[in-house]
Amino acid sequence: MTSRISPDLPGTYVFDGPTSRRGLHMNKLFMSLRSGAARTDFLADEPGYCARFGLTDDQTKAVLDRDWQAMLDLGGSIFYIYKLAMMDGHSMQYLGGVFTGMSEADFKAAMLAGGRTDV
Amino acid sequence: MSEVIWGLATSHVPSIGAAMDRGMTADPVWAPLFEGYAPAREWLAGNPPDVAILIYNDHANGIDLDIVPTFAIGTAERYQVADEGFGRRPVPDVVGSPDLSFHLLQNLMDDGFDLTVFQELDVDHGFTVPLSVWTPDPGDAWPCPVVPLLVNVIQYPQPTAARCYALGKALGRAIASFECARTVGILGTGGMSHQLAGARAGFINPEFDAMFLDAIENDPEKLAALSREDFIRQAGSEGIELIMWLVMRGAMNEQIRKVHSAYHVPASNTAAGLALFDNRTAQPA
């Protein structure tokens, strides 16, 4: 049993030490995608690329399925996950929509209306 | 002896840089943000420092999660602009000031702040967007050499707001004893309220931001007393970046004069704030 030292706030991911340990290999994979050559390698064999970085089966499935919520749950940092989203041509507003159950257009509209002030 | 002449606090949202790089600053979505910057940019153009210090955080571009320094300083002659995945921003590389870096390192160390040292560092949007907010058209070079000071704001536990403010105070003392420059600009970056992930993504808290914009000028001690949980709860999980404004504020005088401030929602998923302060003002007796 480990003690919980970071705050537990509803609807909020706190990227703490244990989370970062859990996601380290997956986050390293995401960071590697900054290079065009790495993106080519990744797209040519996504399961093989995940294996090379030592992702767990759950993490590999999340990456292959582009299950952005699962990536967060399995230790992904949003700043690292965003590298994969960018590669796929997605914006941070698209991800915001995924996390909140909105379309990208609705999420953008909510931001333009002043952001989500009631959550 | 050197003097901090101004402090500029600003958000560093990547899309602010992208809007400038793509010529979209007059678009209806972006125009209000950039109109808010104009008076600060005009004043800054008339008050160039000999050297600047920029407090920022990296976002998976210059450093990864293998090593997460709580506080760090760059000591290089040059800092290359990072390629964050799809080409570097079309802005100049950053010229550093190793003399100032080593002076700050030694003095901060002697003052109890054990900084990590970066001899090589690619700087990402967290660094270049504030430079662009300051200087929209740098041409071949930024206005002066700039020293990067990094703060971990991504991986919990981040340094406390109180520790950031104390670092700023030590930074101010260290700057004052630097003999190779006369005038210093200091930039605190990040914020304001925002949250990128989770069911609360898109969270914005204009009341907290207004309080912060006022208190950073008039009552920084109040902000230094906020806990990590206060920041995450009231400003969102990424709003904790605002602790970097406290490093800037700590390096400035007790009394400062606001030159200009601006606030706009949204820049991407973020509440964007700017506050520019003149540090050359009469102090209380």
Image (spheres, coloured by chain):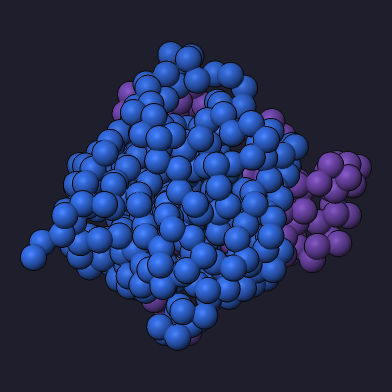
Where is residue A72? Give x, y as percent: 56, 54
Please tell me which residue is depicted at 41% across the width and 73% down the height of the picture: B177
Q: Which chain is purple?
A: A
Whether residue B6 is situated above or below residue B151 in the rendered picture: above
**Residue A67 visible in the displayed image:** no
Q: Nearer the viewer, residue B59 or B283?
A: B283
Q: Which of B212 and B119 is in front in this view?
A: B119
Q: Nearer the viewer, residue B90 or A62?
A: B90
Where is residue A118? Give x, y as percent: 26, 38
Where is residue B115? Give x, y as percent: 53, 76
Indicate left or right for B166 with A24 as reference: left
Please tell me which residue is depicted at 43% across the width and 13% down the height of the picture: B28
Q: Which residue lies furthest to the left in this view?
A: B285
According to the rendering, which colour does chain B have? blue
Whether residue A8 is situated above or below residue B201 in the rendered picture: below
Please tell me which residue is depicted at 55% across the width and 47% down the height of the picture: B144
Indicate left or right for B54 with B95 as reference: left
Q: Which of A21 and B115 is in front in this view?
A: B115
Q: Quadrant of the C terminus of chain A?
A: top left
Indicate left or right for B63 with B220 as reference: right
**Residue B255 visible in the displayed image:** yes
Where is residue B149? Give x, y as percent: 52, 62
Quadrant in the picture for residue B225? bottom left
